Image: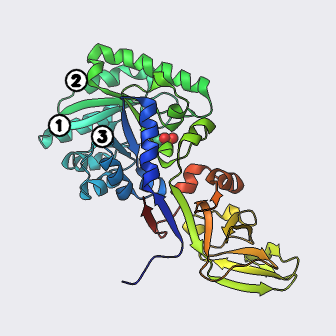
């Protein structure tokens, strides 16, 4: 069979994914773990990553939209799935038909869920969303009582869980503690209406796990970034193994005379006669345009600079007057090969981008190759 893979691809290391899950499990003990697989599993492949996590007995999967959840059900994923994002009332039926857990984020939404579930003679599974400082979906912690009361009054709804989301659990522990206090105050209200033991209470994301905020682990943690092997907390980063290696191959070699321009707007001019290679990837693949004249790549175990503007589909590298590179040579963009490593945190810093948007920004046209 012809190999239709583009030379540009992301290698996703599933062994490392399993390793990261075991690091998280070790940290949180017997609590459940929800694998956050929204946004194409942070760029790594929604279905493949979810299947692997299911094999590893992940307790729950978290996605942003119902469409992602249905894609998982169509791929025969049986694990419970929570859609974390805001609910479009027109989609309630799809949740019920596909056994997908709904985030209940207001009284009006709960009523709509209950009505639809009653109409279809079903029980909707719901996790209540409390806003403790994010200011996006969810009922504010200090106005939560009528919402909670209503949640336990309405027919055809099973309140399976309650959760909130930290806004700065890696960086600002005071703010994080404040959010935890707010969430705890809501849980005391919950106690008035139900036995809290019956609920799955969850709050912690990767930052809280990395900072070992045990009081915030409750019954389940929700892990995205750390599952994929990245943490801004140095000690925790050392325990994790990144799963993402971005690679391409040299597609063109040329010699340019001193004073030649490279790329759009002539932002790079050669200072001497030099060798320039072209790579078949650009910002439309998720190689940030802000890496123009700043990024570094490795070819034949040597580091070289990206020169000129990163184009939509191509970018150029100056390998110097004596640099050695041939068409088809492997190029490491980030991650690691047998001998070399380019730390994605460094690439982010250079690109002035967050690790989340770098990972999610690897576009659909880049094939993902699963190893391990
Ligand atoms: C509600 C919710 N929970 C958990 C996560 C996972 O966060 P992290 O990737 O920092 O673990 C996210 C990610 O944005 C989220 O929106």
What's the mark number on residue 234?
none
Helix, strand or loop for disc 1: loop
Distance (Cα) linking label 1 and label 3: 11 Å
In depth, the one of 299 and 292 nearer the eye is: 299
Helix, strand or loop for disc 2: helix
| Sequence-first tag of 2 and 1 | 1
- Choose mark 2 or mark 3, whichever is in front: 3
Helix, strand or loop for disc 3: strand
Q: Residue at x 55, y 50 (%)?
A: 356
- Seen as rendered, the residue at the extreme left is 121
Q: Position of residue 348 (x, y in %)?
A: 65, 53
In depth, the one of 115 and 297 nearer the eye is: 297
Q: Position of residue 142 (x, y in %)?
A: 45, 20
Q: Position of residue 4 (x, y in %)?
A: 43, 80
For residue 32, which quarter of the picture?
top left
Residue receiving disc 1? 123
For residue 272, which quarter of the picture?
bottom right
Q: Is residue 168 above or below residue 142?
A: below
Residue 85 can be seen, yes or no: no
- Position of 234 with respect to 23 (left or right) is right
Q: Is residue 195 above or below residue 43?
A: above
Residue receiving disc 2? 153
Q: Position of residue 296 (x, y in %)?
A: 71, 64
For residue 289, which quarter of the picture?
bottom right
In depth, the one of 317 and 113 nearer the eye is: 317
Residue receiving disc 3? 102
């Amino acid at each position: 069979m012809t190999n239709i893979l583009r030379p540009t691809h992301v290698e996703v290391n599933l062994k490392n994914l399993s390793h990261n899950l075991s690091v998280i499990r070790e940290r949180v003990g017997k609590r459940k773990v929800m694998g956050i697989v929204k946004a194409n599993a942070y760029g790594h492949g929604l279905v493949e990553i979810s299947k692997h996590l299911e094999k590893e007995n992940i307790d729950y999967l978290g996605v942003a939209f119902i469409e992602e959840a249905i894609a998982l059900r169509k791929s025969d994923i049986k694990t419970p799935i929570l859609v974390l994002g805001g609910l479009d009332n027109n989609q309630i039926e799809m949740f019920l038909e596909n056994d997908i857990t709904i985030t209940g984020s207001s009284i009006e939404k709960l009523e709509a869920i209950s009505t639809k579930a009653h109409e279809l003679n079903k029980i909707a599974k719901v996790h209540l969303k409390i806003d403790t400082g994010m200011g996006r979906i969810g009922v504010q912690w200090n106005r939560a009582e009528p919402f909670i009361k209503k949640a336990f009054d309405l027919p055809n709804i099973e309140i399976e869980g309650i959760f909130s989301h930290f806004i700065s659990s890696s960086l600002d522990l005071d703010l994080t503690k404040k959010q935890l206090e707010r969430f705890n105050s809501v849980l005391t209200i919950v106690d008035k209406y139900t036995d809290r033991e019956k609920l799955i209470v969850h709050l912690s994301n990767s930052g809280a796990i990395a900072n070992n905020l045990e009081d915030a682990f409750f019954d389940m943690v929700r892990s995205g970034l750390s599952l994929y092997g990245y943490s801004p907390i140095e000690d925790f980063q050392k325990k994790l193994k990144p799963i993402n290696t971005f690679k391409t191959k040299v597609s063109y070699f040329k010699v340019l005379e001193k004073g030649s321009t490279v790329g759009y707007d002539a932002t790079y001019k050669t200072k001497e006669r030099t060798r320039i290679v072209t790579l078949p990837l650009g910002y439309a693949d998720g190689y940030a345009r802000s890496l123009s004249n700043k990024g570094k790549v490795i070819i034949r175990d040597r580091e070289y600079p990206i020169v000129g503007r990163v184009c939509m589909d191509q970018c150029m590298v100056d390998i110097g007057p004596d640099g050695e590179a041939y068409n088809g040579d492997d190029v490491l963009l980030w991650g690691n090969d047998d001998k070399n490593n380019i730390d994605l945190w460094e690439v982010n810093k250079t690109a002035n981008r967050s690790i989340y948007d770098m990972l999610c920004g690897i576009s659909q046209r880049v094939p993902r190759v699963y190893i391990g």
